């Protein structure tokens, strides 16, 4: 995908074309939305603020035109701006002037603020998804042939409806992080080979963030509410990234076979217990420094 980065950096018109095209593809294939956000983030990392604003303005106009012609709904571009382009721009701007850790802290903080706002002003937001979830419950009930009771499925459905604002905020956080990482990798490949790998492997979110994450986990364990469970999703997404950073640093520092790293990822994907351990390692790293201990051991 490096050719996309080179096209984006050719000029504002090319960058806007890539961002708008990928945003529209995102309607059919949602990951393309985050590729679109990565295009905005790359411009923010390499170009000045004026060019970023120009690219976003042209991309917005182009996306609204495409949306109006194809879907008769030009207003849908607002969702791209709020959920993808704007967070990516903010994160990239912080990364350019401060650090990778600071950029992740900022977008995590914005996600938590968004969760509080959603639960405060739109508490019934999840009800929008009740009808499709009812259909899904019915399909699962039919396919299970009595192995799963209707009561259990309805309880899961109610929990999902309550947690939807949290899922949305966590998904935006995760998508923004992936967009930021892709943009930084593009920048690294073109302008600073190996720079992103070194930066990611050194990622440390700091003790303050770790304390706040610990507070969220403790509150959820002791007396969790829907709001705190939603906040926990943001913490999980953030510290999964921190844990992955530690894994990459240790494998690089000890010159281990990367095939084992991919195997660990596979185990994490299928084992919630191992994933939880990775998250706990990410939080505890603020005090224990697993990188230093494991690399020099």
Image: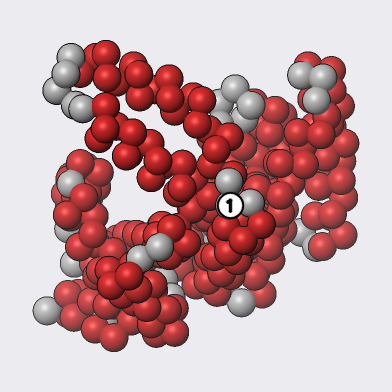
Tell me where residue 135 appears, x and y as whole percent: 43, 20
Q: Is residue 45 left or right of residue 265?
A: right
Q: Check disc 1 and report the residue beneath it.
A: 123
Secondary structure beneath disc 1? loop
Image height check: is 231 above or below 23? below
Tell me where residue 100 appears, x and y as whole percent: 52, 69
Q: Nearer the viewer, residue 241 or 123?
A: 123
Tell me where residue 190 appears, x and y as whole percent: 59, 51
The C terminus: image quadrant: bottom left
Image height check: is 269 above or below 212? above
Residue found at the very far left of the displayed protein = 297
Q: Residues within 10 Å of mark 1 (few under 14, many from 20)?
A: few
Specify the quadrant of the image occupied by residue 13. Answer: top right
For image coordinates 65% across by 40% down, the residue present is 36
Q: Is residue 27 left or right of residue 257?
A: right
Image height check: is 33 above or below 145? below
For image coordinates 20% across by 62% down, the residue present is 277
Specify the quadrant of the image occupied by residue 194. Answer: bottom left
């Amino acid at each position: 995908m490096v050719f996309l980065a080179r096209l984006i950096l050719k000029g504002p018109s090319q960058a806007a074309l890539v961002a708008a095209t990928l945003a529209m593809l995102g309607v059919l294939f949602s990951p393309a939305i985050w590729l679109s956000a990565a295009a905005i983030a790359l411009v923010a990392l390499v170009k000045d603020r004026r060019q970023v604003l120009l690219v976003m303005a042209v991309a917005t106009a182009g996306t609204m035109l495409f949306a109006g012609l194809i879907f008769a709904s030009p207003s849908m571009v607002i969702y791209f701006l709020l959920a993808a382009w704007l967070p990516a721009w903010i994160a990239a701007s912080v990364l350019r002037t401060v650090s990778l850790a600071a950029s992740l802290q900022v977008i995590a903080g914005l996600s938590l603020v968004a969760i509080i706002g959603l639960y405060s002003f739109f508490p019934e937001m999840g009800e929008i998804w009740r009808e499709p979830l009812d259909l899904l419950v019915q399909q699962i009930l039919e396919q299970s042939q009595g192995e799963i009771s209707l009561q259990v499925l309805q309880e899961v459905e109610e929990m999902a409806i309550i947690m939807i604002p949290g899922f949305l905020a966590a998904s935006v956080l995760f998508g923004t992080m992936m967009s930021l990482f892709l943009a930084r990798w593009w920048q690294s490949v073109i302008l600073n080979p190996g720079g992103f790998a070194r930066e990611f492997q050194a990622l440390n979110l700091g003790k303050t963030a770790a304390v706040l994450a610990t507070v969220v986990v403790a509150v959820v364990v002791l007396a969790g509410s829907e709001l705190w469970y939603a906040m926990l999703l943001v913490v999980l997404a953030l510290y999964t990234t921190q844990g992955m950073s530690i894994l990459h640093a240790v494998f690089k520092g000890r010159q281990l076979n990367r095939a084992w790293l991919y195997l660990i990822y596979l185990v994490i994907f299928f084992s919630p217990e191992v994933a939880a351990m990775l998250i706990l390692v990410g939080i505890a790293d603020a005090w224990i420094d697993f990188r230093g201990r494991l690399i020099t051991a």
